[in-house]
Amino acid sequence: MFTTIVTFARFASLDPSPLFADNCRCMARKPGKKLSSKKGKRVRVDLRRNRNKPSTKQDWTRQAREQGLEEMDSRAGESVVAKGDLSRKRTVIVHEGDSDPARFNGTVLVMRGLFAEVDDSKRIWPCTIRRMLRSRLIADRHPITVGDRVRFEIVADEQGRQTEGVIEEVMARNSELKRIAGRREHTIAANVEQVIIVSSAGLPPPKPHLIDRYIVAASGGNMTPVVCMNKIDLDIDGAAVGILERYQALGYRTLQTSAVCGSGIEDLREVLGRASSVIAGQSGVGKSTLLNAVQPSLNLRIGEVSKDTLKGRHTTSTALLLKLDGGGYVVDTPGVRSFDTTAVPRSEIECHFVEFIDLIPHCKFPDCTHTHESHCAIKEALAKGIIHPERYESYVRMFTESNSRGYTES
């Protein structure tokens, strides 16, 4: 028994490699068959916690009293460490480079449950996901998301027709837009360069705090935020333009658009055409409507805002990666009514408020949180009107919520 435990601990101490495959061929070792490592390095990876019955019976103390130690020791077939399907670790082979000619490169266009549509630049392949790849990714709600670059193998059906594929590898991500959903991080889109944060000048009303949350998530995910105020034709008193000017003064690119009168659509088309983007924002602000105005052939579903609750209805049910005729790619995402940014480490939130950066070194305490400390340069700038009160309030909310998830934008 002691020898078995030591062996398990030795395997558990090995580096399981990065969460995403990094060209990792996910192959489980079958009983009685050695895993070849001629083309790669063998590593141990963690799997999703299973709910199967443990391989050993419990209540050892009770069994010892009832049956005696000698009878228990005679059971040589029972193992303390789970084997086979019950094991929470597997041995996989890590490859360097694209060494397997049987695999093809592609980009995930859409995820539908456990199935994906992958574009290899020649055609779109419906793909399943290798079970080993799904099982080892425990931190994300979805192991693969829209925008992921993957390698897949083409499989044939009973008639020998090659009609679908199996995703074997997920490449490392350059960027990702993440939020917290429940207790897990949910990656909305990956490998995009900019986030078009859409707000509304009318129904629903603009929410600067929600814009700030998207900016922090975009900056934390290595993407450039662009603030777009839609339905600008409904901005009778100029309040929405005032909000937009606040972000423009901070150096962010801003857009004023209206799908109804066509205002700003050409500017949006130019911004989308120069880079890969994800368009995000509250439900009902008109994200899909704007994309239809940029390219009518997309024909995306749109909905209306409830006049009773002033909140939008969800019409986009899943994220979609779309290729635009004018150049560029854009991910259309489902609308949200809340956005939890606790995926960004608490100690890094201050770095994503651009007006804070030059002031932070002037705080008296090196670990200043800018919430309650004296001689805080951020709070002094707030009192002088250098920092906008709503921006500071957004920072305080995000900083304090990092210990208690589940914030809902009201």
Image (tube, rainbow, N blue to C red):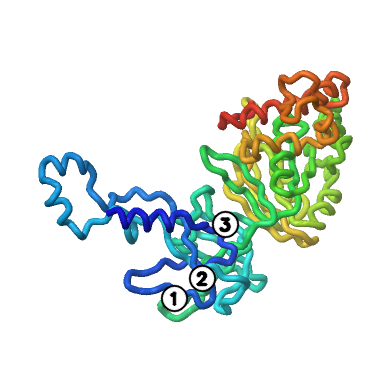
Q: Secondary structure at mark 2?
A: strand
Q: Nearer the viewer, residue 231 or 244?
A: 244
Amino acid beneath label 3: Pro
Residue at 38% in and 56% down:
8
Q: For mark 3, does the 10 Å Cα neighbourhood hold few (<14), some (14 to 19), or many (20 or more) residues?
A: few
Q: Are circles 2 and 1 on residues that touch, CB within 8 Å?
A: yes
Amino acid beneath label 2: Glu
Residue at 71% in and 54% down:
192
For the N terminus, the quadrant is: bottom left
Q: Nearer the viewer, mark 1 or mark 3?
A: 3
**Residue 207 x %, y %:** 72, 30
Label 1 vs label 3: CA separation?
Answer: 33 Å
Residue at 40% in and 49% down:
49
Q: Which residue in the rendered view is the most extreme toward the bottom? A: 160
Q: How many callouts does the rendering have?
A: 3
Query: Which residue was labeled with disc 3?
Result: 18
Q: Tell me if residue 263 can be seen.
A: yes
Label 3 vs label 2: CA separation?
Answer: 28 Å
Query: Which residue was labeled with disc 1?
Result: 157
Q: Tell me if residue 207 can be seen.
A: no
| Vertical relation: 117 (above or below) 337 | below
Query: Which residue was labeled with disc 2?
Result: 164
Residue 144 located left or right of residue 370:
left
For the C terminus, the quadrant is: top right
Residue at 74% in and 47% down:
195
